[in-house]
Image (tube, rainbow, N blue to C red):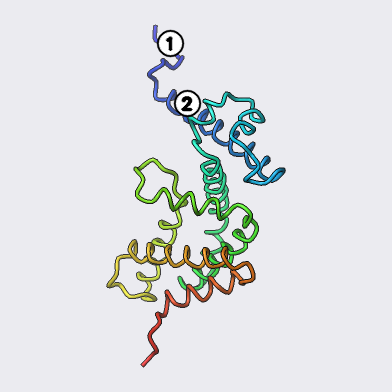
Amino acid sequence: MPSDRASPSSPTEPGRRERKRQQTLDHLADTAWALFHEHGFDAVTMEAIAARADVAKGTLYKHFPVKEALLRHRFHRDLAAGLPALLRELALLPTAAARLHAFFRHNADWSIGHREFLAHYVRFRLGEVGAADGISHSGLDRLFAELIAAGQQHGEFRRGHDATVLARNLQFLHLCALLRWLHTPALDLRAEFAAMLDLFLHGAEVPR
């Protein structure tokens, strides 16, 4: 008589293993996040994170080889969690340009709230350029591509350029504005992002 219990090869097992893995990643990242806030990023060691999380150092290093990888996981998880509500808000706006401006206002506020750790995150992410698939991504390139493609479909943006290429260009402009702000604390990040997006949407050429 067939058993109702899932065998080790059952399709449910990989799902359970993945959920368990995600729980472990979240636990480690949340533990590190608390320590970073308590002591500052530079003062926290991987050994301290493992001890607070009550895991072996080998377990921590298996999932996160460096502290910055813990930041990446935390940031990307939080951004993904907040994305559905943000998309609902953006959908209420009348144009793709308005949606992009609203996104960057939200992103500026988020960046200001995480400034203490952003330089570490950005430096780490730049070191991952060209890395193999499997590396966690923020998803901004896909979001930008979707917003730009929608603008093209509605006649707001020219259709002669691939939306994914335009999205990558916008992503690099975003990074440049962010790096400028990190280097110059007195700058208004909302204003920097607005100027950056205006350049992307309208170009540097004087209208004729």
Q: Quadrant of the C terminus?
A: bottom left
Q: Picture quarter containing residue 188? A: bottom right
Side of 43 where 161 appears, left or right:
left
Query: What residue did someone put label 2 on?
Result: 17
Q: Is residue 196 above or below residue 56?
A: below
Q: Quadrant of the N terminus?
A: top left
Side of 185 where 206 appears, left or right:
left
Residue in front for this viewpoint, 116 or 100: 116
The percent position of residue 186, horizontal first and vertical second, equals 64, 71
Query: What residue did someone put label 1 on?
Result: 3
The percent position of residue 132, horizontal first and vertical second, equals 34, 43
Which amino acid lies under the numbered mark 2 shown in the image of this protein? Answer: Arg
Q: Picture quarter containing residue 206? A: bottom left
Which amino acid lies under the numbered mark 1 shown in the image of this protein? Answer: Ser
Secondary element under disc 2, as helix, strand or loop, is helix
Residue drawn at (44%, 17%) of the image: 6
Mark 1 packing: few (<14 Cα in 10 Å), some, or many (20+)?
Answer: few
- Which residue is outermost to the top? 1
Residue drawn at (35%, 71%) of the image: 152
**In this view, the mark in front (1 or 2):** 2
Residue in front for this viewpoint, 88 or 20: 20
Residue drawn at (44%, 44%) of the image: 136
Q: Picture quarter containing residue 205? A: bottom left
Q: Is residue 154 above or below residue 171?
A: below
Residue in front for this viewpoint, 81 or 116: 116
| Callout 1 touching callout 2 (CB < 8 Å) | no
Secondary element under disc 1, as helix, strand or loop, is loop
The disc at residue 104 is none
